């Protein structure tokens, strides 16, 4: 069994094949699950997971929304055990909790949850955007699911909304889609929060329907930026635009609809500071990294 072909499931590290999934799992049929995307980075002290407590605290809020039991300490142990077992020093880590058994009704009270952690080698889901001069971003006709309908957390079923917007964007020749609400305010991209730079000031887009991003919070700390509501017209007048997320890290936007933007100096400097933080090379990041010892 390949060391990379293992997962942690309810306290046990096993092969992906042995983990299995029921064809009548409630989460498979209805999307009743919650997940997180977390990164493990190589540091001078060995592999370390970036901001795991914050990710799992957000994951618990999603589990609570589904009335699903969730043990943050157990999943933390699962992340550590899995990374020790697979030996990856750089990895994308995916904790997932979902309702598996207990029936297919919409009442969650009889259901039983399963908790797992997977990890794999990873590059940004946006690909090598630097080689293309930045992310190609498209304003979507699809609206973001409102927070009044579904809380802006990483609930599995809610990501169909993002997939539809992304599909529209990629069919039009873009890399990513931008959600804008009916009043013309920017929300977020399908898998990232949105920042822009104007006259050297860093602004994080704030919107009640957007995911409270952990990478977003990190970049705000690194930049000393501000967060506020932003209109689409204001974003179109930006000097620089970049996206943030665990998978994407900090990705410059090079094309925004019909407009070309050169990845700017503020974006490049923040990307450098972010890489220093996740690899344990800055004082600010010391409390953000959970070391994974060999045993």
Image (cartoon, grey):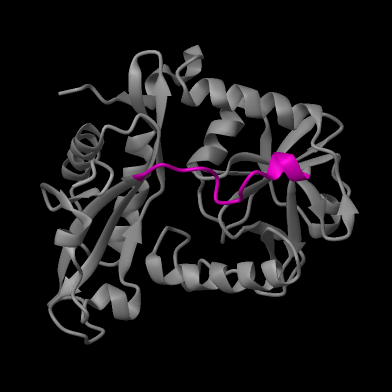
Asked if residue 224 can be seen in this view, the reply is no
Q: Which residues are magenta?
A: 120-132
Residue 23 versus residue 177 in the image, above or below? below
Whether residue 131 is in magenta: the answer is yes
Residue furthest to the front in view is 1
What residue lies at 57% left-to-right and 58% top-to-bottom?
208
Q: Quadrant of the C terminus?
A: top left
- Residue 281 visible in rendering: yes
Front-lying residue, 167 or 210 = 167
Q: Nearer the viewer, residue 215 or 202?
A: 215
Residue 92 at what x, y percent from top left? 40, 43
Vertically, is 272 above or below 245?
above
Depth check: 292 or 284 in front? Answer: 292
Q: At which x and y percent is residue 129?
A: 69, 45
Look at 22% across and 87% down and name the residue there.
105
Which quadrant of the view contains residue 108? bottom left
Q: What secondary structure predominates along the stretch shown in magenta?
A: loop
Is residue 157 shown left or right of residue 57?
Answer: right
**Which residue is nearer to you in this view: 149 or 130?**
130
Asked if residue 151 lies left or right of residue 63, the reply is right
Horizontal arrangement in the rendering, residue 238 relative to residue 287 (left or right): right
Against 292, is 92 above or below? below
Residue 235 located left or right of residue 211:
right
Quarter holding residue 179: bottom right
Is residue 232 a member of the stretch shown in magenta? no
Q: Position of residue 205 (x, y in %)?
A: 67, 48
């Amino acid at each position: 069994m390949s060391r990379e072909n293992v997962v942690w499931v309810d306290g046990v590290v096993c092969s992906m094949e042995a983990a299995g999934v029921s064809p009548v799992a409630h989460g498979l049929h209805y999307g009743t699950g919650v997940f997180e995307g977390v990164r493990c980075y190589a540091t001078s002290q060995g592999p370390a997971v970036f901001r795991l407590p914050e990710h799992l605290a957000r994951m618990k809020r999603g589990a609570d929304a589904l009335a699903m039991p969730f043990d943050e300490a157990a999943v933390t142990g699962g992340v550590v055990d899995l990374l020790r077992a697979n030996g990856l020093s750089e990895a994308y880590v995916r904790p997932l909790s979902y309702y598996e058994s207990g029936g297919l009704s919409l009442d969650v009270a009889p259901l039983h949850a399963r908790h797992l952690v997977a990890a794999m080698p990873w590059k940004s889901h946006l690909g090598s955007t630097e080689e293309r001069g930045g992310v190609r971003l498209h304003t979507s006709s699809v609206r973001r699911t409102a927070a009044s309908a579904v809380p802006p957390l990483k609930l599995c079923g809610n990501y169909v909304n993002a997939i539809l917007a992304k599909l529209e964007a990629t069919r039009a020749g873009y890399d990513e889609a931008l959600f804008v609400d009916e009043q013309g305010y920017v929300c977020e991209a399908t898998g990232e929060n949105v920042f822009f730079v104007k006259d050297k000031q860093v602004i994080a887009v704030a919107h009640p329907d957007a995911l409270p991003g952990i990478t977003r919070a990190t970049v705000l700390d690194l930049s000393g930026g501000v967060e506020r509501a932003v209109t689409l017209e204001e974003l179109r007048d930006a000097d620089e635009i970049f996206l943030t997320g665990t998978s994407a890290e900090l990705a410059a936007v090079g094309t925004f609809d019909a407009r070309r933007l050169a990845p700017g100096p503020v974006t490049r400097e923040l990307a450098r500071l972010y890489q220093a933080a996740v690899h344990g090379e800055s004082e600010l990041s010391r409390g953000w990294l959970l070391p994974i010892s060999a045993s």
